[in-house]
Image (cartoon, rainbow, N blue to C red):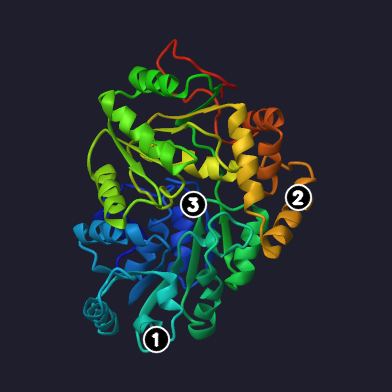
Amino acid sequence: MPTALDILQQTFGYPSFREPQETIIQTVIDGGDALVLMPTGGGKSLCYQIPALARPGCGIVISPLIALMQDQVNAMRELGVRASFLNSTLDAATAADVERALIQGELDLLYIAPERLTQSSNAGVTPACQIALFAIDEAHCVSQWGHDFRADYLQLSLLHEQFPAIPRIALTATADEQTRLEIAARLQLTDAAHFVVGFDRPNIRYRIGLKHNARQQLLAFLKAEHPQDAGIVYCLSRKKTEETASWLATQGFTALPYHAGLPAEERAAHQARFLREEAVVMVATIAFGMGIDKPDVRFVAHLDLPKTIESYYQETGRAGRDGAPANAWMIYGLQDVIKLRQMMQGSQGSEQHKRIEQHRLKRDAGPVRDHQLPAPSVARLFWRDLPRALRQLRQLFGARANLGCHRSLPHGAECRGPHR
């Protein structure tokens, strides 16, 4: 069997591992379980793709990212990996063909939506199949306190119950200590090896400013620093994404809107253009982003305050995944605070939401410890006291994520925040 390094070099074309990829990969190859917290762009996918190729059988990847599965499978097939996916976009005949290929040992990787796996049929994933591993991607979706909770993830403990000898690896870029503990408990990974990688992204420069004329400020930023670059502009409302994209198009940019209210075909087409074309600006709500794997995103701009610090860190982490310099740029105003408070109040209608909110507020009362970031336990406190939020944001990003200058800035370039 080829070694992990052989697969890394011969299949994926990388000369060496990043820390701690090799240790994680060898843990899973040897049959151990792992819980991995690694920042966006840190190379999480290789941590299950390589063990899947090194071990006999098919690696089963559970992912909530239905819209991206086809792109992920295409990328694997271009590398010579026998990959496929199972989700609700497939008709019955095609899904049956994929299940048959799995049973007959014709696949190296199978990406599958969690609801397919938790159905009574198990989508053909049975003890009769030779399974290399189970990879639970975006594992923070199991957390009921998280911002991307998926009910189907709660049933994934069945993997350990039905396949006790198969190694499992759970991966996320977004989890504080409490969420990690919840992931481990709900997925029965308390005895797994835990790998927590720091959040420092030294190639990203973070800048925050006051909002006075949002469109003109955005235009000045793009023209001065990113006239021909791909990037993401986040807005809170669907209407604002469409209006901003349309306006940017009149200014000479290739700008596309993306939000959950657009027809599925239009969303898929816009996403495909963003991933495959150069210099496309996606103007989006938070419906766009999780799992986006475009290495040359040179900027992430926020025209409104994100809902939480955790969301902000995850969204800005989509910039600069190739390691080259990138910008995280945000402007804010009083109306952002008012709008966020209204949205928070509107989300507390059910008794369950009220209990969750009370629990969060109780946790928020404690001090911020050890500059942990991202931290949903302090997120709401940040956005309810904006001046304090910005002070603590600078403290946190200064300690962990290099708020201020990235190391490749040209001489004389503007920098706000502490140097490193």
- Is residue 320 toward the left or the right of residue 335 in the image? left
Q: Earlier in the sequence, mark 3 or mark 1?
A: 3
Label 1: element kind: loop
In the image, 260 versus 35, the foreground residue is 260
Q: Nearer the viewer, mark 3 or mark 1?
A: 1
Quarter holding the C terminus?
top right
Q: Which residue is mark 1?
A: 121
Badge 3 element: loop
Q: Which residue is mark 3?
A: 20
Q: Rate crowding at label 2 as few (under 14), some (14 to 19) or many (20 or more) other CA atoms within 10 Å.
A: some
Residue of label 2? 361
Q: Quadrant of residue 89?
A: bottom left
User: Mark 3 Cα within 10 Å, few/some/many (few <14, many 20+)?
Assistant: some
Whether residue 397 appears in this view of the structure is no
Q: Find residue 19 and report its horizontal and vertical position in percent.
A: 47, 48
223 up-or-down from 110: above or below: above
User: 279 or 302, which is in the foreground?
Assistant: 302
Nearer-N-terminus badge (3/2): 3
Q: Residue at x 47, y 24 (%)?
A: 214
Image vertical order of residue 269 relative to residue 131, above or below: above
Which residue: 54% across, 22% down? 211
In this picture, residue 369 sits left or right of residue 85: right
| Residue at 53 percent of width and 19 percent of height | 212
Q: Amino acid at mark 3?
A: Pro
Real-space CA distance between mark 3 and mark 1, rounded to the nearest whole angstrom? 37 Å
Task: Tell me the quarter of the picture where residue 122 sits.
Answer: bottom left
Q: Which amino acid type is marked by label 1?
A: Ser
Please state the horizontal and vertical placement of residue 261, each as a whole percent of the image: 39, 52
* Residue 115 in picture, x, y percent from top left: 44, 73
Give the x, y percent position of residue 73. Answer: 27, 62
Q: Is residue 283 visible?
A: yes
